[in-house]
Image (tube, rainbow, N blue to C red):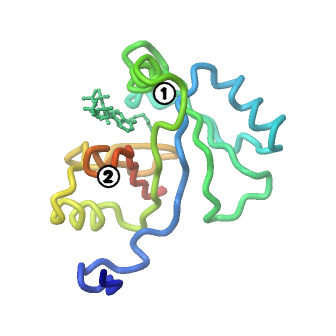
Amino acid sequence: MSNDISAIDIPHELVICLDHVGIAVPDLDAAVEFYRSAFGWVNHHQETNEEQGVTEAMIGPKHLKETDGMIQLLAPLNENSTIAKFIDKKGPGLQQMCLRTSDIEALSKHLTEQGVRLLYPAPKVGTGGAKINFVHPKDAGGVLLELTQPA
Ligand code: CMX
């Protein structure tokens, strides 16, 4: 297999790091407390995203470096939430993995040219005002893959 990334015309710096993994949880406070008492990780940011139907907490080591991957705890806002449906079907657990990009429009264009399906025709608003989109799990080896460009 060729390692020549220029063959598919995508700059190395377009995808920066693993931003977070997302875990569906029924009780946000209990999950935050688990990571605090078990690992000493702290809640760096919490918000409610009505459009996505979630309240979320971003968990990481106390002294966080810019490219440290975090854990995103996702609790459903109501029974119609994607996260409520996920918990009903599969139980609590790993729901998604998220890559950070410097340019979500360029990455989306690149992916759709490769035949990879994105869930939204244009990015929506995610954590802290980031631009987000998702690759369908069927096109990413069974993983719901979020793409985020921080605000
Ligand atoms: N990870 C891996 N596979 C998943 C999945 C997930 N999280 N969710 C669904 N799937 C699989 C299903 O198992 C199913 O596979 P099979 O056909 O083999 O059974 C397939 O994908 C399609 O599932 P579906 O029941 O038809 O579709 P859903 O109603 O479950 O919706 C999805 C799936 C990805 C479209 C939906 O979860 C979605 O829109 N996700 C994006 C938004 C989101 O997750 N928001 C919450 C987080 C917000 C945030 O991160 O800020």
Q: Which of the two residues, 44 or 134, is positioned nearer the viewer here? A: 134
The image quadrant where one finds ligand 1 is top left
**Outermost residue toward the top in this view:** 79
- CA distance separating discs 2 and 1: 23 Å
- Residue identifier under label 1: 54
Would you call the spot at circle 1 few (<14 residues within 10 Å), some (14-19), or many (20 or more)? many
- Disc 2: which residue: 140
From the viewer's perspective, is residue 50 above or below residue 6?
above
Where residue 147 appears, as percent x and y from the top left, is 39, 54
| Beta carbon at label 2 within 8 Å of ligand 1 | no
Which kind of residue does numbered mark 2 sit on?
Ala
Percent x, y for residue 71?
A: 61, 45
Callouts 2 and 1 close, C-beta under 8 Å: no
Mark 2 packing: few (<14 Cα in 10 Å), some, or many (20+)? few
User: Residue 28 at x, y = what percent?
Assistant: 64, 25
Could you say which is closer to the camera, residue 46 or residue 137?
A: 137
The secondary structure type at the circle numbered 1 is strand
Kindly identify the residue that appears in the image at 18 percent across and 65 percent down: 114
Provide residue 113's location: percent of width, then percent of height.
Answer: 15, 65
Residue that appears at 70% across and 24% down? 29
Q: Which mark is residue 119?
A: none
On whether ligand 1 comes within 8 Å of the CB at mark 1, the answer is: yes
Secondary structure state at the residue bearing disc 2: loop
Q: Nearer the viewer, residue 56 or 135?
A: 135
Residue at x 25%, y 81% (from the top left corner): 9
The earlier-in-sequence mark between 2 and 1 is 1
Quadrant that contains the N terminus: bottom left
Q: Nearer the viewer, mark 2 or mark 1?
A: 2
Q: Amino acid at mark 1?
A: Val
